[in-house]
Image (spheres, rainbow, N blue to C red):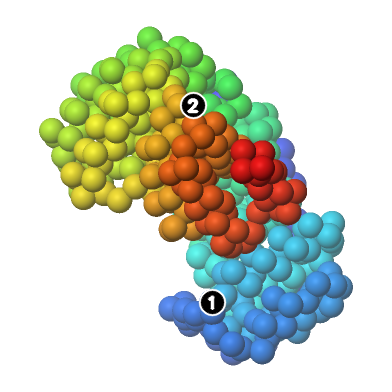
C-alpha cells in the first residue's frame, strides 16, 4: 500500500499517466469575468438549439460555434448535457475537441472552470484526459490548488484502478507542491470502501491522522457504513466509539447508518431507542430527519409491529415533519402485508392525492385485500383507489390498469 507520508515528503513513485501538451495557440476572445452567472432556464436561442439538437455532429458544431458565448459556456446544464449526449453517441473525439478548445480560451485560466472540464471528462469516462487536464494547467496559465487536485483524484477513483490511484497519490501532490486535505482523503477512503478493500481504507485514515489531517465526521461515517454493510459491526461500533473519543460527534447520517444496520438485522426496538436518543438530543432542526423515521417505521413494519410503526409515524407529525413519498410507500406496503387494508387505504388515498403512488404490486395487493372483504364500503374504497389510479401523471401502462380493473370486476360480476 502507498504511504501517505510520501505525499508530503518524498513522492518517489513515477507518474504512470502521460501528460499531453495542449495547443499553444490562444484564440483572441473577450475576457470572461469570473463572477458571471447566467440562469439555466432563460430563452436564449443558442441554449434552445442545443437542447433540441439530436444529431451528434450538428450538436458538436453548434456548441463549437458558441465557444465564446458566455450564456452557453457558463451554463453548467448546457455543458453537461452536451457532453453526456456526445458520450452516449460514442463521439469521444468530439468531446475532446470541445473541451481542449475551451482550455485555450480566457475561461481556461480560471481554476473553477478547469475543475468543471475535469469533471466533464470524468462524466464521459475519459479518465486519462481528466488527469492530464490537471497536470497541464500551467500550460494555459491556470493556477492549481488542492481543489483541482481533488477533482482529478475523484475522477481517477471512479476508474477503480488501484495501481493508478496509488501512483497518483505518491507522485502528483509532491510534483506540484500541493498538500492533501481532509476532502482528498475522504475521496480515497470512499473509493477503497466501494472497492471492498476496507482495511486499506482504514489505514488511510490512520495515516492521515499521523500527518495532522484530522478525520472528520464524513471520514468516520463512510468507514462505519462500509463495515456495517460488510457485516462487521464490531469494527463499525469501534469506529463509532473512536470518533466520539476523538471529539468528533456523529451527525444525522452517522445515526442513520447505524439504524439502517439494526433494521436490516431485525433489531427494530434498538433502532427505535436510537431514534428516541436523537429526539432527546437535538443538534439541528433536521436531527432526526425523515430518513431516520422511515428506517424505524420500516423496521417495525418488517418485524410485524404495525402499531409501533404507527406510533413512530405519529411522532414524525408531532415533530413538525410531513411524511414524504418513501414513508408512505413503506407504510402502505407493510400494512397490506399485515392485512390492515383499512389503514392502508387511508394512507394510500392521502399519498395518491399528492400524486405519490406506491408500486403497482402494492396497489394490486390493496385492491385484492379490499375486494376480498366483500363489504360494499370496502368495494367503494377499492373503486376510489382505481379512480385515483386513472388520474396518475404520467399514467400507468395500459396492461397494469387493465389488471387492476379485472381485480375489481371479478368481485363485481
Q: CA distance from mark 2 to mark 1?
A: 45 Å
Query: How packed is label 1: few (under 14 Cα within 10 Å), some, or many (20 or more)?
Result: some
Residue at point 66%, 54% (across, down): 396
Percent x, y for residue 214?
Answer: 31, 34
Query: How packed is label 2: few (under 14 Cα within 10 Å), some, or many (20 or more)?
Result: some
When asked about the image quadrant of residue 44, the answer is bottom right
Residue at point 43%, 15% (across, down): 265
Q: Is residue 47 visible?
A: yes
The residue positioned farthest toward the top in the image shown: 234
- Check disc 1 and report the residue beneath it: 40
In this view, 270 is above or below 69: above
* Nearer the observer, 352 or 319: 352
Percent x, y for residue 193?
Answer: 53, 27
Percent x, y for residue 108?
Answer: 60, 71
Mark 2 vs 1, N-terminal side: 1
- Check disc 2 and report the residue beneath it: 337
In this view, 180 is above or below 239: below
In this view, 91 is above or below 185: below
Q: Quadrant of the N terminus?
A: top right
* Secondary structure found at label 1: loop
* Secondary structure found at label 2: helix
* Left or right, 379 with reference to 244: right
Residue at point 28%, 18% (across, down): 269
Amino acid at each position: 500500500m502507498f504511504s501517505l507520508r510520501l505525499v508530503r515528503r518524498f513522492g518517489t513513485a513515477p507518474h504512470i499517466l502521460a501528460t499531453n501538451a495542449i495547443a499553444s495557440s490562444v484564440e483572441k476572445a473577450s475576457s470572461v469575468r469570473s463572477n458571471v452567472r447566467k440562469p439555466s432556464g432563460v430563452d436564449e436561442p443558442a441554449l434552445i438549439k442545443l437542447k433540441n439538437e439530436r444529431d451528434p455532429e450538428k450538436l458538436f458544431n453548434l456548441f463549437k460555434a458558441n465557444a465564446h458565448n458566455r450564456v452557453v459556456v457558463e451554463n453548467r446544464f448546457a455543458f453537461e448535457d452536451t457532453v453526456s449526449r456526445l458520450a452516449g453517441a460514442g463521439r469521444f473525439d468530439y468531446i475532446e475537441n470541445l473541451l481542449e478548445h475551451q482550455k485555450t480560451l480566457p475561461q481556461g485560466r480560471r481554476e473553477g472552470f478547469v475543475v468543471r472540464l475535469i469533471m466533464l471528462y470524468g462524466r464521459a469516462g475519459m479518465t486519462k484526459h481528466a488527469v492530464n487536464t490537471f497536470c497541464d494547467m500551467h500550460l494555459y496559465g491556470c493556477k492549481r490548488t488542492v481543489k483541482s487536485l481533488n477533482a482529478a483524484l475523484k475522477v481517477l477513483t471512479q476508474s477503480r484502478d488501484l495501481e493508478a490511484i496509488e501512483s497518483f497519490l505518491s507522485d502528483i501532490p509532491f510534483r506540484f507542491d500541493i498538500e492533501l486535505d481532509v476532502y482528498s482523503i475522504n475521496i480515497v477512503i470512499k473509493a477503497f470502501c466501494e472497492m471492498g478493500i476496507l482495511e486499506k481504507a482504514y489505514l488511510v485514515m490512520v495515516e492521515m491522522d499521523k500527518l495532522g489531517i484530522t478525520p472528520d465526521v464524513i471520514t468516520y461515517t463512510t468507514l462505519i457504513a462500509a463495515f456495517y454493510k460488510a457485516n462487521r459491526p464490531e469494527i463499525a461500533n469501534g469506529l463509532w466509539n473512536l470518533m466520539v473519543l476523538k471529539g468528533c460527534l456523529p451527525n444525522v447520517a452517522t445515526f442513520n447508518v447505524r439504524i439502517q444496520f439494526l433494521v436490516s438485522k431485525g433489531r427494530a426496538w434498538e433502532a427505535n431507542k436510537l431514534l428516541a436518543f436523537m429526539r432527546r438530543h437535538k443538534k439541528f432542526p433536521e436531527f432526526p430527519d425523515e430518513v431516520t423515521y422511515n428506517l424505524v417505521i420500516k423496521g417495525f413494519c418488517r418485524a410485524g409491529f404495525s402499531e409501533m410503526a404507527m406510533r413512530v409515524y405519529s411522532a414524525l407529525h408531532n415533530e413538525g415533519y410531513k411524511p414524504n413519498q418513501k414513508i408512505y410507500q413503506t407504510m402502505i406496503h407493510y400494512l397490506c402485508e399485515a392485512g390492515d387494508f383499512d389503514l392502508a387505504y387511508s394512507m394510500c388515498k392521502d399519498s395518491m392525492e399528492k400524486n405519490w403512488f406506491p408500486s403497482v404490486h402494492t396497489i394490486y395487493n390493496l385492491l385484492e385485500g379490499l375486494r376480498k372483504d366483500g363489504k360494499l364500503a370496502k368495494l367503494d374504497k377499492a373503486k376510489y383507489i382505481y379512480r385515483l389510479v386513472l388520474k396518475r401523471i404520467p399514467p400507468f401502462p395500459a396492461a397494469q390498469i387493465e389488471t387492476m380493473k379485472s381485480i375489481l370486476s371479478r368481485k363485481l360480476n
